[in-house]
Every structure is written in C-alpha cells, then in structure tokens.
Amino acid sequence: MSANNFTLEAATAANIVTVGSDKGSQAVHDLIVAYQANRRTGSANTKTRGEVNGNNKKIFRQKGTGNARHGDKRAPIFVGGGVVFGPRPCDYTKKVNKTTRRLALRRVLGDVITAGKVLTTPEFVIADGKTKSFVKAVADLTPARDVLIIAASFDEATYLAGRNVQNVLLMTAAEVNIEQIMKARCIILVDSALETLASRTA
C-alpha cells in the first residue's frame, strides 16, 4: 500500500467542499460542545432534607439548654443531614441541526487538508488479521502517531488486527466525526470513503 498527499484540488475534484477561514468556526465550536455535553450522564444526585433517613423528632427542647434552637436532625447543618442546592439528575443533551453539522465537517476537513495532514491510499486491508501486520502497514504509510484511518468499511480481519493499537483509530466515512478528525495528527483516507464524505459535506 502507498499513500499520496490529499490536496485542495483533489478535494474539489472529489466534491469534498471546503470553506474559507472566516466561516464555520462557530459551527465547529457548537458541535464539539454538543459532543462533550452528550457524553455527560447527568447522574449526580444528592438528597434533600426530605429524602435522607431520619424522623421529625426535635433533637432537644426549645428552651433551657443554652444551645441554639433546632428542629430535626435532617437539617443541612448536621452531619448526615440533607444537602442544600446540591446536584440533581439532569439531561445535558444538546441538539445540533444538520446544516451546522455539515458546515462544521466542511470546515474541519478543509483545515486538515490545508495543513497537509491527509493522505490517500487505494485500499487498507490486513488480510491475515495480525497486529504486527497492521502496525507495519500503518508505518509504511506514515510515521505519525495518533492516526485516523477512514474507509467506506473495514473487514473483520482488519478490525481484529487493529483493535489493540491504541494510537490508530479505524472509522467508517459514515460515522467519523469532527472531534476524531481534529485529534488525529495524520488522516489516511481510503479512496472508497471519498463518495460518502462528499455526500456528508454537500
């Protein structure tokens, strides 16, 4: 397998539309924020004084003890009492419309292509399913670490060979997102992925 630099001219020929430097940055920001927000479980939870264990019995009489007056032991000022304004289960999901997603993908693809981070190869297949063969195939294409390989699809043997290689990520063109593209130091683009990526940016 051999790799070639993917230029802006090649991107245009493949109908992968790129945008100018003054457009799309807000879309990228909005989409990254949405990705991070959607990963939050929102499961943090504290109990109020009405939910903690205990009864409503007054802990000591109102007068005559020299202490401040208090009610039950579930008050927030006591150990084991309720929590005031603590976290409650919450849905942090953010929705991003299709137009914004497409603009963000065009912007990110344009940036990585301009930066010369994208290489193309006719195919990427590890027939024997061995990790050693996978590592050698990637090294033959690029010496970079944090490599993202994008293809229309991968066979089971290729997935098997690459599952233990931490610095290489295999993603299909239909599923890859801008966060993965931005994190990669080198992107190997298999020819079979061009049509799908073009349809996602159009």
Image (spheres, rainbow, N blue to C red):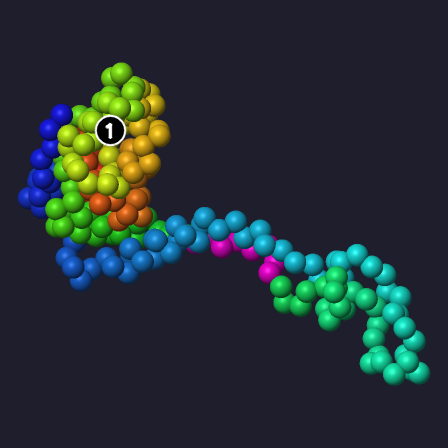
Residue 86, percent across and down? 62, 64
Residue 187, percent across and down? 20, 40
Quadrant for the N terminus in the image? top left
- Residue drawn 89% across and 66% down? 57
The answer to which quarter of the image holds residue 44 is bottom right
Residue 68, percent across and down? 82, 81
Q: Magenta segment: does it hold 92?
A: yes
Quadrant for the C terminus in the image? top left
* Residue, disc 1: 135
Magenta span of residues: 87-94
Q: How many marks?
A: 1
Residue 26, percent across and down? 28, 60
Say above or below: 34 vs 81: above
* Horizontal side of residue 162 vs 88, given as left or right: left
- Residue drawn 92% across and 76% down? 61
Secondary element type, mark 1 = helix
Q: Is residue 126 visible?
A: yes
